[in-house]
Amino acid sequence: MAHDPKQRREQLKEILTADPFLPDRRLARHFDVSVQTIRLDRLALGIPGQRTRTKQVAEKAYQRLRAMGQREVVGELIDLELGKAAISIMEITTDMAFERTGITRSHYIFAQADSLAICVIDADNVVTGIANLKFKRQARVGDKLIAKAQVIRQKGQKFVVLVETRAKGELVFRGKFLVFVLDERGSQE
C-alpha cells in the first residue's frame, strides 16, 4: 500500500470518488494505517465523513426525482439516473417486522422496490400496472436492504423495471414491474 502520505491521499480521493459510502475503518484496513490517519487524510483533502458523504449523494439523487416527492420514496434514495437505474437503502426496524419472529413484513420490501421502480422513470406521472414478485429469503430486524432498480425495456410509455433487493449480499427479493407513464388526466399516453 501507499506509505507516502501524498500518494495515499491521492488514492484515497480516487477511492472515495468511486465509492463515497466506504467507512473510515475499511479504508484504514485497505491502506494498512490507523483510522485516525484516514480521518486526518480526509480532513487535509476536505472530504467529509461517511454520514455527510452519504447525505450529499442522497440529496443529489432526490433533486432529480420527477415521478414522486422525496417523502414518498420508501427507503433512502442514494443514487438515481433517470430512465436507467436507481438505488435505495432501508434499514429494517422493529415496527417493520413481526413481533414474535423479527421477520420483516413483506409489504415493506415491496414498497421499497415499487417506489424505486416508479422514481427511476423520467416522467411526472407514473404508476405500477403489473408486478411479478419473488421473495427469495427472509429479512430481519437490523438488516440493511439495498434495492437496485434497472430499466430493462421500454415500449412507448410502458417500462419494465427490474428491482433486486439484497441484505448482507444475499438476494432477498426480485421483482419485475411494468410501469406506465400517464398524461395529465391520468390516462395512459
Image (spheres, helix red, strand yellow):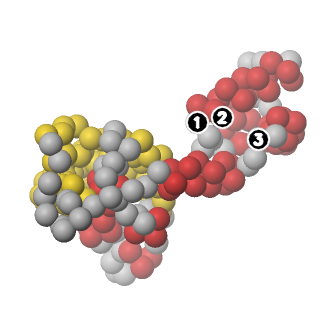
How many angstroms separate mark 3 from mark 2 (CA)? 9 Å
Which residue is tagged 3?
A: 47
- Is disc 2 placed on a helix, strand or loop? helix
For image coordinates 42% across by 79% down, the residue present is: 95
Residue 9 sits above or below residue 169 on the image: above
Q: Contact, CB < 8 Å: mark 2 with mark 1?
A: yes
Which residue is tagged 1?
A: 19
In the picture, measured across the screen, residue 10 lies left or right of residue 101, that is: right
How many angstroms separate mark 2 from mark 1 (CA)? 5 Å
In the picture, measured across the screen, residue 49 lies left or right of residue 81, that is: right
Q: Earlier in the sequence, mark 1 or mark 3?
A: 1
Amino acid type at image mark 2: Leu
Which quarter of the rendered picture does the N terminus lie within?
A: top right
| Quarter-of-image position of residue 45 | top right
In the picture, measured across the screen, residue 46 lies left or right of residue 112, that is: right
Residue 144: horizontal and vertical position, in percent?
Answer: 46, 57
Which residue is tagged 2?
A: 16
Residue farthest toward the front in the current orientation of the protein? 184
For image coordinates 25% across by 59% down, the residue present is: 126
Q: Nearer the viewer, residue 91 or 74?
A: 74
How many angstroms separate mark 1 from mark 3 (CA)? 13 Å
- Is disc 3 placed on a helix, strand or loop? loop
For image coordinates 38% across by 44% down, the residue present is: 82
Residue 52 sits above or below residue 151 on the image: below
